[in-house]
Image (cartoon, rainbow, N blue to C red):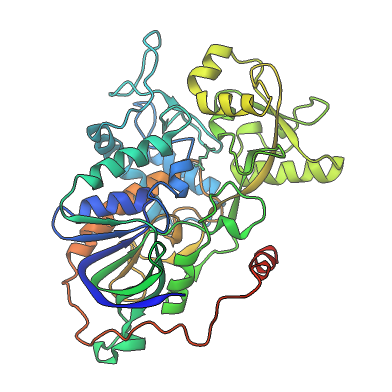
């Protein structure tokens, strides 16, 4: 049973979530203030860590911010907010530069190939992009990025890191301190998953960087903890939410009874992979002029249509025509994982299916990442900034996380820190009790 800790922690900034958005934001806030950084599990248990493809950014002299914006809006099926698209794409080159300065080891172009970008990076291409503009670390970009950011936060004196802490609910003035006037976020109740205690954090500013809710779906590329808790608590606190129906399905997750959630990066199609049916017929040209590299929603729907027509359980991604060395160089992780499942992708087609991947909607925020509840910000996948419209352009998610970390930190510094004067009431679980049958949980989950 949980106990209530009598102590209340007081801190200027509470950052909830340790994906790319939360970690980068914590670093930026810590240049001028103290940060408590909370993670539901270990720091690496987040969607960002599993991102394979990379970070979309205009780095090549033949590319332009305008073209990146056009591609983003086209992929978003006209529902993107143009001002936000322009803002975010303009921040790409600075974000990549900052990561290079932190030592993030992006894949470089091989010496034989000339490059048209200043840092000699190998840029890949993914669905919906009209140019090569995805900076990446082989096929484990998220892993390399998150490890680099974790190293930075760990060496920062102004950041206190608390893994395995689950936020239960936000503390708002509407509920507990009506003298603040308009509804304001004043902190959060937190459950310590190690000690099973519940304590309160009083803070000046609260930042939700809690990721998406792909785990609501049975088949998803997301890790187990992508359960949408941040979105739910923001809703309970009075935040506006939008576009929740726009769950992006990634077209190519590995179809194998033992591979729970393994993604075959869209960069595989960028480098020449072709989608085929079980007879080996390429089918994407029937659906879109960009073929296998059409925007993600179009490819996922095309696969769904093919599966319904044929009654088959999966389609195939074929990269057998690529040079084996190139496959192993660009996709070492995908190559070795598939090999572990008995599939040599250099001479066998890869069985794939679409799966829930990214929440394009979320908590509505303005161009500074502010929600409609005062002193409560949201960024990363949990937020709905207007960048993605109804379908996110590939590799724009890490870009958005990093861009908004910068924007939100600046906006937050303009908000004076004021703490709630009242004592925070101890958490009450009401009449809830642990279920005597754990099966109830899995029934609810399944439903
Ligand atoms: C991928 O590598 O295909 C995923 C990249 C993304 O979701 O943007």
Image height of 83 relative to 60, above or below: below
Q: Is residue 196 visible?
A: yes
In the rendered structure, the answer to whether residue 341 lies left or right of residue 366 reads right
Q: Nearer the viewer, residue 364 or 443?
A: 443
How far across and down, in percent of the image, does residue 177 sit? 28, 88
Q: Is residue 55 visible?
A: no
State the image quarter where residue 310 is shown: top right
State the image quarter where residue 83 is shown: bottom left
Point out the image quarter for the C terminus: bottom right
Residue at screen point 52% across, 15% down = 326
In the rendered structure, the answer to whether residue 207 lies left or right of residue 447 reads left
Image height of 419 relative to 311, above or below: below
How far across and down, in percent of the image, does residue 147 sit? 34, 39
In the rendered structure, the answer to whether residue 31 lies left or right of residue 97 reads left
How far across and down, in percent of the image, does residue 377 sit? 33, 66
Residue at the left extreme of this rendering: 32
Q: Nearer the viewer, residue 401 or 86?
A: 401
């Amino acid at each position: 049973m949980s106990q209530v800790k009598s102590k209340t922690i007081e801190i200027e900034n509470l950052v909830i979530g340790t994906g790319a958005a939360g970690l980068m934001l914590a670093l930026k806030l810590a240049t001028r203030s103290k940060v408590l950084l909370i993670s539901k599990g270990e720091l690496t248990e987040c969607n960002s860590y599993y991102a394979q493809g990379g970070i979309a950014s205009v780095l090549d002299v033949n590319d332009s911010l305008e073209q990146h914006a056009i591609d983003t809006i086209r992929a978003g099926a006209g529902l993107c907010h143009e001002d936000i698209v322009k803002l975010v794409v303009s921040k790409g080159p600075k974000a990549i530069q900052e990561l290079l300065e932190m030592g993030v080891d992006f894949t470089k172009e091989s010496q034989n190939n000339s490059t048209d970008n200043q840092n000699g990076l190998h840029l890949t291409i993914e669905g919906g992009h009209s140019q090569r503009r995805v900076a990446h670390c082989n096929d484990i970009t998220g892993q390399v990025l998150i490890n680099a950011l974790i190293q930075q936060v760990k060496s920062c004196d102004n950041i206190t890191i608390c893994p395995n802490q689950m936020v239960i609910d936000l503390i708002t003035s509407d509920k507990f301190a009506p003298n603040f006037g308009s509804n304001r976020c004043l902190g959060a109740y937190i459950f310590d998953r190690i000690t099973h205690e519940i304590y309160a954090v009083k803070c000046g500013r609260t930042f939700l960087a809690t990721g998406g809710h792909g785990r609501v779906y049975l088949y998803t590329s997301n890790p187990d903890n992508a359960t949408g808790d941040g979105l739910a608590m923001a809703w309970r606190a009075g935040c506006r939410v939008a576009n929740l129906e726009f769950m992006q399905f990634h077209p190519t997750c590995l179809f194998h009874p033992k591979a729970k959630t393994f993604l075959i990066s869209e960069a595989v199609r960028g480098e020449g992979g072709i989608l085929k049916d079980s007879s080996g017929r390429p089918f994407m040209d029937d659906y879109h002029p960009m073929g296998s590299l059409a925007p993600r929603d179009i490819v996922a729907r095309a696969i769904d249509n093919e599966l319904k027509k044929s009654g088959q359980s999966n389609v195939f991604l074929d990269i057998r025509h690529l040079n084996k060395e190139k496959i192993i160089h660009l996709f070492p992780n995908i190559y070795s994982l598939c090999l572990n499942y008995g599939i040599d992708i250099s001479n066998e087609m890869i069985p794939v299916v679409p799966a829930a991947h990214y929440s394009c909607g979320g908590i509505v925020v303005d161009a500074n990442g502010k929600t409609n509840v005062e002193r409560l910000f949201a960024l990363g996948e949990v937020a709905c900034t207007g960048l993605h419209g109804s379908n996110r352009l590939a590799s724009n998610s890490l870009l958005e996380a990093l861009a908004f970390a910068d924007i939100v930190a600046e906006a937050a510094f303009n908000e004076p820190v004021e703490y709630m004067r009242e004592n925070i009431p101890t958490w009450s679980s009401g009449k809830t009790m642990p279920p005597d049958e754990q099966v109830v949980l899995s029934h609810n989950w399944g439903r």
